[in-house]
Structure formats: structure tokens, C-alpha cells
Image (tube, helix red, strand yellow):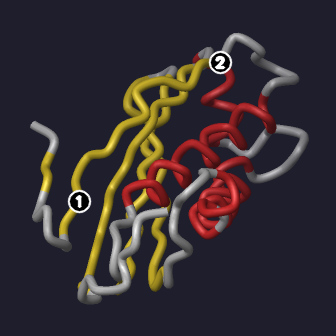
């Protein structure tokens, strides 16, 4: 594990996103809360937040961080795709990119799990870091 003990604590933010592609009928069922397992997006939001907090348990050598904020948003981008976006913030000695990426992946996997009975062909794609700020390496913004 990298020694970050001498690094200063700074305000760090990371935003990550993922796409969940599905049949139009599945998206309609999600948006109208017609999936038998319940409120898909509400449960996926909680799963994403939980995933961000469990990142050091899942990814070897990730430092446990003092996360101060996690926001999970869902946006239908066409009639067969939902974008999942996570914004994670911490005041710590290392960045929160992995926490944001884990959050969107966990939320997307929860959508799949809750809807697989109606659409096993769903795909999770384009998991990526959108932006980050804070720390020695400075800011990053995907073009």
C-alpha cells in the first residue's frame, strides 16, 4: 500500500458514470415502478452509496477514506438506456476516483439484478471517470 501519511488532507471530488442499456419496455417498467422487486432506482442509489463506502474491502490496496458526500443520479438518455452518475467527495490524503467508479458499477449491477427477470440482455458499458479535483495531480476533465 502506498504511504500517504505525509500528504496533506485536501478536498477531493470525483465523478464517474456508466451506461445501462436495455429494452425500451424494461426502461419504461423501471420509470413507472413496475418491476416486481420494487423501486429499482431508489434501491440502486442506496447500493451505489454503499458500494462507494465499501471500496477498500473490494479493491486491494485502496485506502479507507473519510467520505463526506456521495450523490448518485440516474438519467434516461434515450428510450433504452440509463446513465448512472456518481459524485463522491472526501477531505483526505488520497483521491476518490475508485470510490466513484465502484459506486456507479454497484448501482448499475443493482439495476441489472432487479430487472434481469424481464431483460437478461441488458448490458453495462462505458464505466469511466468523468472528472476529478483535488490533490497533487490536480484536476482532470474528460473531453
Residue 73 rendering spot, x and y as whole percentages? 46, 56
User: Looking at the image, how many numbered discs can be counted on the residues?
Assistant: 2
Q: Residue at x 13, y 49 (%)?
A: 141
Q: Measured along the vertical axis of the image, is residue 129 above or below residue 39? A: above
Residue 132 got which mark? 1
Q: Residue at x 32, y 45 (%)?
A: 129
Q: Measured along the vertical axis of the image, is residue 10 above or below residue 74? A: below
Name the quadrant containing residue 108: top right
Q: Which residue is mark 2?
A: 122
Q: In this image, 17 relative to 51: left or right?
A: left
Q: In this image, 66 relative to 78: left or right?
A: right
Q: Quadrant of the C terminus?
A: top left
Q: Residue at x 39, y 80 (%)?
A: 90
Residue 120 rendering spot, x and y as whole percentages? 77, 15
Q: Residue at x 28, y 75 (%)?
A: 12
Name the quadrant containing residue 11: bottom left
Q: In this image, 59 relative to 116: left or right?
A: left
The residues bearing labels 2 and 1 have C-alpha atoms spaced at a distance of 29 Å
* Mark 2 Cα-neighbour bin, 10 Å: few <14, some 14–19, many ≥20: some
* Mark 1 Cα-neighbour bin, 10 Å: few <14, some 14–19, many ≥20: many
Between residue 63 and residue 41, name the one nearer to us: 63
Tags 2 and 1 touching, CB below 8 Å: no
Residue 69 rendering spot, x and y as whole percentages? 45, 79
Amino acid at each position: 500500500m502506498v504511504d500517504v501519511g505525509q500528504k496533506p488532507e485536501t478536498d477531493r471530488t470525483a465523478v464517474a458514470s456508466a451506461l445501462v442499456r436495455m429494452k425500451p419496455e424494461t426502461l419504461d417498467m423501471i420509470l413507472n415502478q413496475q418491476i416486481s422487486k420494487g423501486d429499482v432506482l431508489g434501491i440502486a442509489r442506496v447500493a451505489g452509496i454503499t458500494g462507494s463506502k465499501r471500496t477498500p474491502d473490494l479493491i486491494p490496496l485502496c485506502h479507507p477514506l473519510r467520505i463526506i458526500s456521495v450523490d448518485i443520479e440516474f438519467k434516461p438518455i434515450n428510450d433504452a438506456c440509463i446513465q448512472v452518475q456518481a459524485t463522491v467527495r472526501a477531505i483526505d490524503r488520497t483521491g476518490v476516483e475508485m470510490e466513484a467508479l465502484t459506486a456507479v458499477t454497484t448501482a448499475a449491477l443493482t439495476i441489472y439484478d432487479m430487472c434481469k427477470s424481464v431483460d437478461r440482455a441488458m448490458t453495462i458499458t462505458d464505466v469511466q471517470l468523468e472528472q476529478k479535483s483535488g490533490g497533487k495531480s490536480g484536476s482532470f476533465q474528460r473531453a
